[in-house]
Amino acid sequence: MIKYAPEELREKREQYEKNDKRRSYYMLLLLILVEILYLYMVKGSVHSFWGVVAVILGALFIVAIIFLAIPAFINARLSSGFSKELKKVVDKYGNSGDAKQFYSDLLAMNCRPKTMRGEIVWYLNISTALIEQGKLDEGLELLEILEGAGDKAEAEFIRKHKENLKRQRAEQ
């Protein structure tokens, strides 16, 4: 079961950013290690400027594969359980339209989000469930918290969503 604590989102964002920085440092160390090992392995074949350039480009190619493929695989594995479970819950809500059950199912999820984007998506779904239940003020309050915790793109999306909700509220 996931803990519902939107007030902790700012601290979670800081923790995720701290982990990302740590991961970046490890990847930089890996880059340097690969460069050194690659140069050491082919040092006998480097006899000219273009040989050195080829060695550096080869090492950069290897590092690019490491930097792109491995993190993509890790991120996919990290959020796959949460994403699959969330998709089931959202599909169930799409078929039934029962906002109370949707809210209950979201709170009863077993897999917790492992990325900040996952946290934001989960809370956005909770705000949708609250708004659909007629708890507009509580939903807008949650969106306000999410806007402060999200990155620039997420905050802009949430701000537009709040404006639309307030406009719909005024029209009623």
Image (cartoon, rainbow, N blue to C red):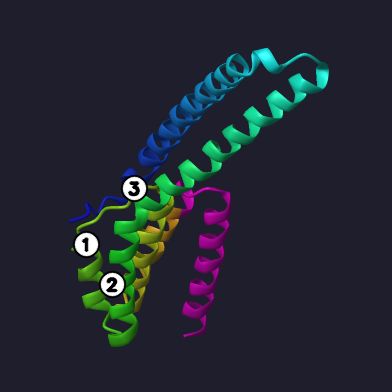
Q: Secondary structure at mark 1?
A: loop
Quadrant location, the N terminus? bottom left
24 left or right of 92 in image: right
Q: Nearer the viewer, residue 89 or 12?
A: 89
Mark number displayed over residue 89: 2
Q: In the displayed orientation, state which residue is furthest to the right.
A: 49
Residue 9 placement (x, y as % from top left)? 36, 45
- Of pointers 1 and 2, the one earlier in the residue sequence: 2
Magenta stretch bounds: 147-172
Query: Height in image: 167 above or below 113?
Result: below
Mark number displayed over residue 109: 1
Mark 1, residues whose alpha carbon is within 10 Å: few (<14), some, or many (≥20)?
some
Residue 123 placement (x, y as % from top left)? 35, 59
- Number of disc labels: 3
Q: Secondary structure at mark 2?
A: helix
| Three-letter code for the amino acid on which mark 2 is drawn | Val
- Of pointers 1 and 3, the one earlier in the residue sequence: 1
Mark 3, residues whose alpha carbon is within 10 Å: few (<14), some, or many (≥20)?
some
Distance, label 1 to label 2, CA atoms, is 9 Å
- Of pointers 2 and 3, the one earlier in the residue sequence: 2
Q: Nearer the viewer, residue 140 or 48?
A: 48
Is there any visible trace of residue 119 in the rendered image? no
107 left or right of 53 in image: left
Residue 129 placement (x, y as % from top left)? 32, 72
Distance, label 1 to label 3, CA atoms, is 13 Å
Query: Height in image: 5 above or below 33?
Result: below
Q: Is residue 161 magenta?
A: yes
| Three-letter code for the amino acid on which mark 3 is drawn | Lys
Residue at the spot of label 3: 114
